[in-house]
Structure formats: C-alpha cells, structure tokens
Image (cartoon, helix red, strand yellow):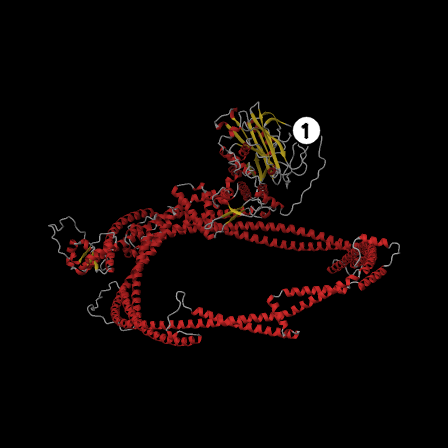
Amino acid sequence: MYELSRIRLYSIGPAGARYADTVLDLRGVGEPVPSPAPAQADFFEEEPVGPPRRPAPAGVLFLENGGGKSVLLKLIFSVMLPGHRNTLGGASSGVLRKFLLADDCGHVALEWQHTLTGETVVVGKVSEWRGRQVSSDPRKFAEAWYSFRPGPGMSLDSLPVAESNAVRPAAEGTSAARGRRRTMKGFRDVLVEAGRAYPGLDVVWEEVHERWIEHLGNLGLDPELFRYQREMNADEGEAAGLFSVKNDSDFTDLLLRAVTDTRDTDGLADLVHGFAHKLGRRAELTAERDFTAGSLDLLRRIDEAARRREQARAVHTGAEQRTRTLARRLSARGTAERGRAAELAERADHAARAVTTAERDRDRAALIASELAYRHASLALAAAERSAAAQRRELGDARTLHAAWQATETVLAHRAAADRAARVAAAIREAERDAAPALAARARAAADLVRALQTAAERAEQLAAEEEERSTALQTAGEAAHRDATAAATEAQRARSESEHLRQRLAEVEQETAEAVRAGWLDGSAPDTDPARAALAASDAEKAAVAAWETAKEAARRTAERARETAAELGRAELAAARAVDAAEAAGAAHAAERRTAEALGAEERLAELLGLPAGGTGAAGGPLGAEEVDRTAETLRDLLEESVAAAERQLFELRTAAADDSRILGALGDGGLLPPGPDVLATVEYLGEHGIPALPGWRYLAQAVDPADHAAVLSARPELVDGVVITDPDSHARAREVLRDAALLPRSAVAVGTAAALLAPVPAAGADGAGTDGVFLVPPNPAMHDERAADAERRQLRERAAAREEEIRALAARLSADRSLAARIASWRTGCPPGRLAELAAGARAADEAAEAARQRLEEARATAAEAAEAAAEAARVRDERQERAQQARRSADALAGLAFRLRERARWQTRLRELADEAAEAEARAGVCLERARAADEDRRAAQRAADDARRTARALRAERAEIAGAPDAPDGLDDAASGSSAEPPASLPALREAYRAASQLYEKVGVGADLRAEQARAEGDESAARAALDRLTNKVRTRAAQLLEGPDGADGPSRQAAAARAEALVQMLESRASAASEQLGRLRGEAERLAPGEDREAYTELPGEMVPADAEQAQALLRGANSELAARTDALEAARAAHAELVRAQRAAEDAAAAFDELAAMLRDLLRDPHGTGGSGEDGAEPEPYAEPLEQARRAAAEARRSLRGCAADLTAAEAAVREASDVLVRHANATRYEQVRTPARQQIRELPAAALPDHAAAWAAAFEPRLRVLTDELEQLERNRDSIVDRLRGLVESSLATLRSAQRLSRLPEGLGEWSGQEFLRIRFDDPDHAVLAERLGEVIDEATRAAVRRNSDLRRDGMSLLLRGVRAALQPRGVAVEILKPDAVLRAERVPVGQMGDVFSGGQLLTAAIALYCTMAALRSNDRGRDRHRHAGTLFLDNPIGRANATYLLELQRAVADALGVQLIYTTGLFDTTALAEFPLVIRLRNDADLRAGLKYISVEEHLRPGLPKPDPESEPVHGEITATRMFRRPDRPGRREGDRAAAAAD
C-alpha cells in the first residue's frame, strides 16, 4: 500500500487561489522504510544519508480561511476520483472547469511512496481548454490522466510541464520548471517518449474514466476509498455525515457495501437472473402442489368421517329414550321430598322459639357472673394497694436506719480529725517564738553547701562532655575497622566461589572423558590416548557421512519427484476415468429415464382409446405402445387430450351447476325434523318465559296445534304471526305487551306477537284469482318449518336426484383429471425430449460406454506405473534417513570430542588458578580477623567512655537535686555571692564537711525551733480533717442527724456494737425489700385481672345486682361468684340442648329440601340433555304417572351420572362425528379459500369453493381419486426446480457467511494499541450477532431468493444489477431474529470504556467526539478493505483527506486518539485547517504553512509554501544570509510524570 509523499500543482486554480508551481512535501518525517528497494538516482541527485524514511503519518496543511483549502482538496480528488459528478463537496459538475484559465495547461501530480519498499509512483492529471478559449461547452474541456514510476529520466521534480527544467532541484516548495508551458499534446509526447527511452518508468496515459480507475486499482491505490472520503468532505468539518445511520443494520450495510467485492455479487445476480422466471413459477406450482396434496388428504378424511357419523347417530337415539324415563322418575321423587320438607319446617319453628328463651336466660346469668367477678377483683385490688403502701413506708425507715449505722464511723472520724488539728496548731504557735538565732546559722551553712554543690556539678558536666567526644571518635574507628573486615571477607568468599567453579569444571571434564570412553569415541585401554587426534578423525568421518547423506538425499529427491509425477498422472487418469464413467452413467440414465417415461405413457389405455385402437394394446407386438410409437404420435395425442378435456369441463360445469342448485334446496330443508325459528323469535319467547308468560314460536304452534290441511290457509291469512310469537294464555296478552315494551330487545326483524285466537281467526275470503285484494302474496315457505312429512318427501326426492348426478359428476371428473394428468405428462415429456431425442440419447450412451472402457484401461496402466515409482521412492527415502542418522551421529561425536580436547588443554591452567585462589582466600580471611579484633577493641573503649560520661551526668544531676532539697538557702544568685564574699578569706571546705555543718545547723534549729514532726503532724491532721469533712458532706442531713442520735444510744458505745446494729439493719432492709417485691407482683396481677374483667368504656357495670347479691368485701364476693358461675353453667347446658334439637330439625329439613332440589336438578339436568324433553319416544307411557325413584340420592346421582355419561358419550360421539364431518368440510373449504392458493386456477378448487360444505362429503371419494395423478406430476416438476434453487441458495450462503466473517474482522481490526489508558487493547468497534444455524440460514436465504424472484417477475425487472441488495437482504435474514448490535467507544478526556450504539452517536456524542468516532470508523473500514485484498500482514489502509476537522475537534485527547487509531490501522491523515491552534498543531509531526499572495498586476492570487514545520531544528541554508549568532548547546529538563498526571489532565480538559 502507498502513502502520499508529495503533491505538485502547476498552473491551475481559480483566480483567487492559483497554484503557479507549488510542491507540498510530506517526506522524511515518518519511520524508516523496513525493506528499502534498490533505486538508481538521477545524475545530479545528492547521495542519500541513511535509510529512506516514510512520509509523515499525519500532517496539516495550514491556510487562512477563504484562501483555497477546498480548491486543493478538489484538485487532489479529481486525480483519484475522476469525473465531474464525483467533484468534492457536492459542487456543480462544472466547478473544475473554473479552475483553468484560457492559456493554462494545468497539472495536479501526486507522488505515492510504498510503505514497505519505499518505491514511489506518480499519478497525475493534466487538463486544458481546446483552442485556448474558455467555453461553457464541456466538450471543449480536455483532461487526461497519467502515471509513471520515478527513476532516471523523469521524476516529480523534473515533470515536463515546461519546455525546460532546472538542472539541480530548486529550494523546498519552489518551482523547477523553466520556460514556456507545454500544451497537453506536448506534455504527452514528452511523457511517452521518456517511457520509450526508459521502460522502467512504466508510463501509462489514460483518457477514459473507467480505465483510469481500473489502473489505479492495479497500482494498489484504492479509488473506492476516495468515494467515501468525498462524502466525508461534503461540508467543512462534517466528516461524520457518512456514518450518520438510524440503526445498527444500516451501519453494517454501509460497511459491507464498502468492503465487498461487487464481482461476487454480480455473479450471484447473474445466476439468479438466469433462473428468475423459473423460480417465479415456483410459488404457483408449490401452491398447486400443496393445494392438491392438502385437498387429497382432507377428502379422505371427509369420507371416513361421514361413515362414522351414521353409526353414532343410531346409538344416540337409544340412549335418549333411557334418559327420558329416568328423568320422569327422579322428578316424582323430588315432589315427595318437598312434602316431607314442609312438615319438618313447622317443627323447626317451634324449636327455634325454645332456643330464643334459653339464650335470654343464659345471657342474664352471664351478666350477673361477670359483674360479681369484676366486684371481687376490684375489692381485692383495693386491699392489696393499702398493704403495699404500708410496706413501702416501713422499707424507707429501714433503709434510713441502715445508712445511719453505716455513717457513724464517718462522723466519729471527722470529730477525731478536727480535735487533733486544733491541738497541733496550738503547739506550733507556742514553739515559733524561740527559734530565730538558730535559723540564721542554718541559712549560712546552707549557702556554703549550695555553692559547693554547684561547683561540683559543673565539673562533672565538663567531664561528661569530654568522654562523649572520645566515644564518638572510637565509634568512627570501629566502623572503619568493620568495613575493612567486610571487604576482606568478601574477597575471601569470591576466591572460594571461583575455586568451587573451577573444581566443578574439572569434574565435568573428567565426567566427559569417561562418557567419551563409554561411547567408544576414545580408547580407554591406551593411557596416552590423545582426544585431539580422536576429534580430527571424527571430523573426517563426519564429512564422509555427510557426503553419503547428500548423495542419498539427491537420489531420494529424484525418486520422489518421479513418484509425484506418476501419482499426478494416476490422478489425472482416475479423474478422466471417473468422468468417463459418470458421463456414461449420465447418458445411460438420461436415455433410460426418457425411455421409461415414454413407455409409462404408452401403457396408458386412454391413449389407445384416443387413437381409435382396440383395447388390450396395439403396439408392434400386440402390447402397449412402445417408446418409439409414443415419440411419433405425441403431438397428435396431446391435441386429442386437449379436445377431450375441454368437452369434459363444459359438461362437468353444467352438472355441478345443477348439483349446486339441488344442494342449496336440500340445505334449506335441513337434515330432519322441524327447523328452528329465527333468533329474534327465540329471544322473545325466552324473555316472556322468564316473566311467567307462556308463549311459543308461531311455527311451533302451527305444527303442534293446527291441522296440516289448514296450514296453507293460516299461512296465507296470518304470515306475520306464524313467523312471530303466539301467547297461549289470552289473559297474559296485555302483560306481555308491557313486558316487551320495557325489555328493549331491539330485534333486527319484525316480530309479531299475538294470541292463539288471533292466529286461528277465520280466514278472509280470497279474490277470484286466489290472491288478496291488496296485491300482497306469500313466497312458499320451507315445509321443514311446519310439516315434517312434506319436508321428508321433498328431501328424499332431491337426494336421489343428487346421488345420480353425483355419480355422473364423479365419473366425468375422474376422466377429466386423468386426461389432464396425461396431457400434462405428455407435454412435460415432450418439453424435455423433442422429436429425435431418443435416438440421440441412445447413440450418446453407446459412445460414452466405449470412452469409459478406454479410460478404465489407461487407469490400470497408470496405477501399475505409480506403484513401481512409489516403491522406489520409499526405498530411496529409507536409505536417505539411515545415512542422515549416521551423519548426525558423526557430527555429534566430532563436536563432543573437539570440545573435550579444548577443555583438556585448559585443565592445567585451571589447576594453577585453583591453587592461587586458595592462597588469596587464606590471606583475605587473616586480614578480616585482624580488622575484626581492632573493631572489637575500639567498641569496648567506646562503651567505657560512654559509661564514664553517663556517670558524670548522673553525678551532676544528683548534686543539683541535692541543691534543690536544701532548706534555708537563698534562691537568688546574688545571695550566694554575698555569702561567698563573707567567707572568701577562709580556705574552701570539702563537700562532706559542708554537709556536716549544714546538718548540725539544721539539728540545732530543729532543737530550738518548731520541729518538722510537729509541722508534719499539723499537715497530716489538717489533711485528715479535710478528708473527713468531705466524706461527711456526702451524707444527707437526715442520715447525719440519725447517725449522731444513734451514737448517743447504747448500741453506739463501741465498734462491735455498731457493727452488729448495722448488720441487723441490713438484714431488715433485705427482708422488707423481698416483701415489697412480692407485694408489687401481686398488685400487678390483681390490677390486670381487674382491667380484664372491667365492663366496656360505654357503661359502668355489666348489670344491676339485687340487694342481697351486692358484696361487702372480697371474701363475700368470692362466695357469690361461685354461685353465679354454677347458675351460668346450668343455663348454658340448657341452651346447648335446645340448639342441638333445633339444629337437628333444620338439618333434616334442609336434607329433605336438598334431596328434593337434587332430584329435581337431576331430572332437569337429564331433560336438558334431551333434544325433545317432553316427547314420549314411542313408549306409550304419556298418560301414566311415573313411579318415584325409590333408591337413595347417592344411588340416584350415580344412575343419573351413568345415564348422563352414556348420553353425553353418545352425544359427544355423534357431535364429534358431525363436527368431524363439518370440520373436515370446513377445513377443505378454508383450504380452497386460503389466500396462498389464490394463484391456483384449477376447476377443482372452484367447485370446492362454490359447493356448500354439507354437500362435500357426498363427493369426497370421487374427488380424492381424481387428485392423486395430478399430485405426482406436480411433485416431479418441483423437485427439479428445488435443485436449481438449492444451488442458488448455496451460492448466496457462501457470500453471506463471508460477509459475517467480514463483520467479525471489522471488530478484530478495530483493536486499539497500548498506551491509551482504559482503552488499551479495547476494540473500538464491537459488532455482536448470533451465528445462524446452517439449516435455518438455508431456509431464510431461500425465502430471500423467493421474494427477490417474485418481485422481479412481478415488476419485470432485471436482477443482474441488484446483486449487492440481494446480499444485504440475505445478511439481514441471517441475523434474525435478534439482528445485529453495533457499539463504539465514546471518546472522552479520561478514555472511559463506555460504549454507545452506533445509531445513537448523533444524540450522545459532541461534535468533536462524533468527528473522532467517524475518523476511527473510516480507518476501520479502510483497514478492512485492505485486509480483504490480502494485505493483512503488512497493514496499511491508505490516506484520509479531511477539510478542517480541527475546527470541530481541537481537544488534545481527541487528536491523540485520532492519531493512535490511524497509526494502529495504518491510515495516513492529511488535514487542512485555517485555525492556527498551536496546541492542536503540536500533535502533528508535519505542518505545511501556505500563504495566498495577490498579484496586483495580473489581478490574481497565488498560493505558495511559506514553511514546512517538522520535528527538530531547521537545517541551515548555505545560500542564505550569514548567521551572526547561534545556539551552541542547550539543556532540557523533563519533569517526571506522576502517576495519574496524564489522566488528571485529561479529566480537567473534559471538565473545561
């Protein structure tokens, strides 16, 4: 695949954006070319430095808005996508002509560089106005396209656009053309001449659009991608418009249209078009075949169901008679049960009154008992509350006594402490008046001692500082000694390790030597065996073995090649033989099939009948017609059959028309008995019966109450009442009018209501002609409405006539069906076997048999030759393998001996080095010991110095502590100085002497002053007094007072008495607390009982008690309550007895009523099952009263259930049989009326649709016999058609499966690279669908083919131009029912793995996100096209041009994502923009800055390259002005990336 390397535009563009000669250079920015191809440079071209590099993977063409960016893209696209209709941006077809002035010969040349080899190819377009005049006629606008491969003789720089070029290449972005512009013809001549002179240029010149597009495809430049880029650049910054789809299936259609090769779909369309008309008839033939097969099966079912119906009808009549008798007996038993129930009801009323009296007495006794129970609970609760209050008071007194006894010790302690503190204070005041001189002497001694202590402490601190400094120095020396010891130990360990390694190598050498001896490579018996000589000998043996192996390998190759050749010849011979056998079998089968078909036709007796030949066969040998005779007379027979079929159809139509008329009359007469009246009449009769008004339908009353001889007269006189309702009770006529007026039945017909007298009124006299005077006459009604005998006679006559006609129709239909089938068979056979075809097939079968025998002989010869060659090849391969094994063994032994010889030469050096290492290890260990000893001594000295410093510190602290404890010494330093000046004349005394002097002064002061013991005693006394006062204050006044009183009594005299009294008080408290707890529990129980027994809130008492029953206390209430409960129990027992008696009577009454109802219900139920409940059934028992049923109800139910079951079973059988007949007939009619059989035009279907369903059973057997041969013919035709359809479905299935694999590849190719945070390794595009089952897929694709062919035949359209649509419909059908789900990752600042359905991109994504998603989808689509074209290993998907996408998506993370996806999928991005956003442009490795300058003299504006912004510093131009200052060095500091910094920056950008 190629990348865009350079663009050159020469003398082209509109007046406001002209390109004089501009080169846009994208080279030298990308990665190095992986496999550069050798190339011959031009004569003056500079030597390349380093490997060639690919063009910029992404670049920006910057030009101010309105400067001509869209013009540049239109010109580029005009090269890759020729044709004015393909102009970029949806511009008018003549926009490119506006880019050329009259004198212009415009050039647009694109240089493409191969991504792997670095080879370049230039494609370009040249255009000019014929005659050098601008015209509106597009025919005068000439344009052509060309391509060549740059090399010696021509390149993009030396393109012959002018009459001369510069010898050396011009500066970057400037023109090398010199002189006058060449015309198109001159340019072509020079280009073609250069192609002849340098064939390596591969010059191509094209002027036809289609050929140029094909040539671009051959070069590896995919023009189809530019079609999609054209749609993406339809408007500036609106690249997402290409992927604006409504749903997921639209996206997959777009993707498949973009990547599917149309040649495959065109081949499918041609195949479908070839069989379209045949497949279009498939539905018609299938419908007729299905109709015939279904009709045949249904007709057989109808015939069988009609026979079962007649049998079930006879059984049902006997069951009805038995059920009617049982119903009358059950009804009589119900009447008897109702009489017994009335008697029991009267007795139950008396028992109910007794129950009411007993309930009243019991309720009064219950109220008295409840009131007494409440009174008893209330009295007991009041007594318990009084007792609990007394116990609480007693408990409080006991607790106060116990606390007072416990507080007596506290009161005594406070009294003693206060007395002692007072006595000590008095003694101290007496002693302080005599201690002043001794106090002064003690102060002087204290000052001397303090001064001495301070001096000693300072000396001790100084000594501690010196010892600490010495300890630090010793510690430094010890650490240095430790380091030296560690280094020495490390050296010793290294020496030991190296020694161990050398010992292992020596042991390995010994082991290898022993193994070589065991393997036989060395002679172990000779002590002076030299491994070097053995290695040389093994090397010579190896060379000999390799030479032998090469010889055997060459021989094996030759024999294998010979075996392959013979095997190939054998394969060709087998294939030829198989083909010959297949051809012979096919020829024989074709001849046999045609002959069998002709013989089967000749066996038909109908053919002989048509030809006028005698029955029994008139063939050449007296048998049936032979195949040759059928072949000779086929056309004559077909004409005769068509004439016979036409005559039979006419006769059959006439017979069926007459049968339909008779069937209609027979259907109106019904199956037997009287027909029911209309629904409105029945509804009126039922409504009147619900309101107790006896009424009958007029027809029923006419049949039952009027003599049949008078029926006609009554019908003529009162037709409206006969078809209405007759009220049998004349007195109910007025009420019936009111009831029906209020009912609002709203019948759909006029329903007359009258009495029987109105119906039977005298008939008015008729006119002379027998008609009424009002001109109204009556259509003769159906006799089945009122006269059963007349209806039966008419019905019997019609059935006999219909049966005779049906036999005639059946015979005629059978003959017609046979003739049609025979004519269809002859036509079908003649279509496949025209005249003379049988002889040709016979000759072809004989020739094929001879060719098959010859091929079989050649096959045997080839097999023998191949077997011999295979044996020779196997033997040569065996010899080759043996020699190869020997050569490998020789090579292994030679290598092993050579290595052993080398290691044996090194063994002496290793042993010497081993001894040296032992000496080095011993020396290092000794040095380590010395260093460790020195470090140990320094450590001991350091610890001694530290201990001395610590001792001095402790001494100083002790002296200062002693100084702080001296009493009487002055606190200020000046006091010490004064004391020192007073005694400076004397020599300093020692510290013990000063201590003794201070002790003596202190003792003297203590002797004459207030003693410390007395002071301490005073402090202790005051402390004790304070503690005692605090403890006393914590007591309450009551307890303190009570304790003082108890101390005055006899129990407070001594401690044991007080303890005994406190123990007694504590025991009393515990006893009283237990009693109070028990009383509280008892009180709670009594309170709960009183609340439970209390009357409701709306009354104060249950009832008013008599005076003698009002209790005075709880005991009396208890006695009265026991008596009341006894009375309540007695009343309750009496009530239960009364209720039991009443319930028994009620149960008996209900049982009698239930029995009566049950018997009546059973009788009614049985009557409901009868078709004629009041009929006698011919038993002669109408006037006799039936005997009541004597058995119990359960047995009656069983009998009724048995009768009901029997009757229902018979009725169900009859109903099922009738329903089966009706259902089968209805199914047949529905089958014939089904919409899927609308295209079936056979007379059989028309007759089934026209005949009533009731008449179908009579014709079922005859029609079934006629349908069988037609079904066989249709089946044969459809089998051939199905084979053609299956081949088309297989072809479409292959394309559909390939398309599904393409969708999976699209998801796989969209995998993102690493370094994108959460998106790393994610698939940008996710396409999910269920893999269809092969059988289901074939079925669905068959439906697609059927629908396509039906639509094509219906519209008479050409399927050859609709292959892609057919494939897409097949893909949609394969993905049903769930369809396809397409999701893409939503670009955001933090790159969250959030997926959005592709159809919702426009609703969810912002503009920049939508554009980024569109770029990613295009890259995936382009990579997929590249993948389908065999470039998956070296993926590159071309170049994407976009017009100003940065204006829509300039966020850094969006640009980074676009770059990452494009780099991963191999798409080169070329953007144009007018927005100089440095942050956005910094993401691109190349920015080409253009400028549009005005030429005021010419009135034109020219676009030129201002600068190429590439990574790194610019190279100096030797021809430019000298540089006066330069940067000689620089330093760059890169701030390290903190974890999460990049994600945080992106999140902040997204928040902004």
Q: Count the numbered circles shown.
A: 1
Left or right: where 208 falls relative to 1102: right
Residue in front for this viewpoint, 1392 or 1241: 1392
Image quadrant in which the N terminus is located: top right
Residue in front for this viewpoint, 799 or 1016: 1016
Residue at (56% x, 23% y) in the render: 1498
Residue at (64% x, 70% y) in the render: 408
Q: Is residue 933 visible?
A: no
Quadrant hosting residue 1221: bottom left
Q: Position of residue 62 (x, y in %)?
A: 59, 34
Image quadrant in which the C terminus is located: top right
Amino acid beneath label 1: Ser
Quadrant hosting residue 394: bottom right
Q: Secondary structure at mark 1?
A: loop
Q: Residue furthest left?
A: 768
- Residue occupied by mark 1: 1520
Residue in front for this viewpoint, 16 or 1428: 16
The vertical placement of 1250 against 1146, above or below, is: above
Q: Position of residue 765 (x, y in %)?
A: 11, 53
Q: Position of residue 64 (x, y in %)?
A: 57, 32
Q: Position of residue 871 (x, y in %)?
A: 60, 54
The vertical placement of 836 against 883, above or below, is: above
Left or right: where 369 falls relative to 118: left
Q: Residues within 10 Å of mark 1 (few under 14, many from 20)?
A: few
Residue at (22% x, 55% y) in the render: 738
